[in-house]
């Protein structure tokens, strides 16, 4: 199982080496902004590297919302990120499931997801594999509770979309980590990436605060079991920089190989 970390985008290959990571994930643009990604000077180095590269889309993206002023730029930003991710040889582009607002019908959000793939298809489809990630909070999220996820996948599963399971988000979102991989796979048929994070907050808290493995509310055995059951690469999105993440990576590697 290949293990790595979410790192600073300035020099991801150096960050990977510092952590002995086999996988890196990073942002191609400000995660809180709407700017398209810029071409990277290290594109060829990233493409040629043995390190598996995953790109996380900006947090501002919400393709599900009925609000045109968020939804339309979200679609465009997702497409531009898919192109930029392809240019550096990224394995996939991870995007949060998004949400509708209080009082809105979840079905509208799910149909907006379908329209996102239809929009991308007009220009040849997403050029990088899209992975939808489960989220921790909100009562109207498309990918917090797995009953909503099942409704989403009924509509968009045909577009070849993949899934990223975040263990912190599942726990804080109110989905038990016991048998979580089986329950997700029953819906999506696949898990392409695990975000292996502990949670500072309790079960079903709805809060999204990651912690180092074994330091928070989640039994780390359940994180290890999820990676093993998924058979997918894992990325820690945990605090503590090189020291904290290296310890998390070493822990997972020892547990998974031991
Ligand atoms: Zn995550």
Image: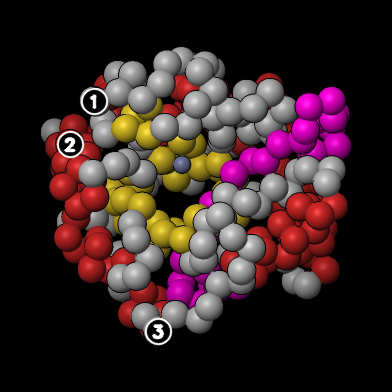
Counting residues from the N terminus, which is met first, the one under dot 1 or under dot 3? 3
Residue 41 is marked as 3
In the rendered image, which quarter is residue 40 located in?
Answer: bottom left
* Residue 208, image x, y percentages: 47, 32
Indicate yes or no whether the magenta region holds residue 38: no
Q: Secondary structure at mark 3?
A: loop
At 34% from the left and 70% from the top, the residue drawn is 10
Q: Is residue 90 magenta?
A: yes
Inter-mark Cα distance, 1 to 3 = 37 Å
Residue at left 41%, top 59%?
26
Q: Quadrant of the N terminus?
A: top left
Q: CA distance from mark 3 to mark 2?
A: 33 Å
Q: Which mark is residue 77?
A: none
Q: Earlier in the sequence, mark 1 or mark 2?
A: 1
In this picture the colour scheme is secondary structure
Query: What is the secondary structure assignment of the residue under circle 2?
Result: helix
Circle 1 packing at 10 Å, graded few (<14), some (14-19), many (20+), is some
The disc, 3 or 2, on the residue closer to the chain's N-terminal end is: 3
In this rendering, the answer to whether 75 lies above or below 35 is above
- Start-end of magenta stretch: 82-110
Q: Nearer the viewer, residue 4 or 66?
A: 66
**Residue drawn at the location 29% of the way across and 51% of the way down:** 4
Dot 1 corresponds to which residue? 214
């Amino acid at each position: 199982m290949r293990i790595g970390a979410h790192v600073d985008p300035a020099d991801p290959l150096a960050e990977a080496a510092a952590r002995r990571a086999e996988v890196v994930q990073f942002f191609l643009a400000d995660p809180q902004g709407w700017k398209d990604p810029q071409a990277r000077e290290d594109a060829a180095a990233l493409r040629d590297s043995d390190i598996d590269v995953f790109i996380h889309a900006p947090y501002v993206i919400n393709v599900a919302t009925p609000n045109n002023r968020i939804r339309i730029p979200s679609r465009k930003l997702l497409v531009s990120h898919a192109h930029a991710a392809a240019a550096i040889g990224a394995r996939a582009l991870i995007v949060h499931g998004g949400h509708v607002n209080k009082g809105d019908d979840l079905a509208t959000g799910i149909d907006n997801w379908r329209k996102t793939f239809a929009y991308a298809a007009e220009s040849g489809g997403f050029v990088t594999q899209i992975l939808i990630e489960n989220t921790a909070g909100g009562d109207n999220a498309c990918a917090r509770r797995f009953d909503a996820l099942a409704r989403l996948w009924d509509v968009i599963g045909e577009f070849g979309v993949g899934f990223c399971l975040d263990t912190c988000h599942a726990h804080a979102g109110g989905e038990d980590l016991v048998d979580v991989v089986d329950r997700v796979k029953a819906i999506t048929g696949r898990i392409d990436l695990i975000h292996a994070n502990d949670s500072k907050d309790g079960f079903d808290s709805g809060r999204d605060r990651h912690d180092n493995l074994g330091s928070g509310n989640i039994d780390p055995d359940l994180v290890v079991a999820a990676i093993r059951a998924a058979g997918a690469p894992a990325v820690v999105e945990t605090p503590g920089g090189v020291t904290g993440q290296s310890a998390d990576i070493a822990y997972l590697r020892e547990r998974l190989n031991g």
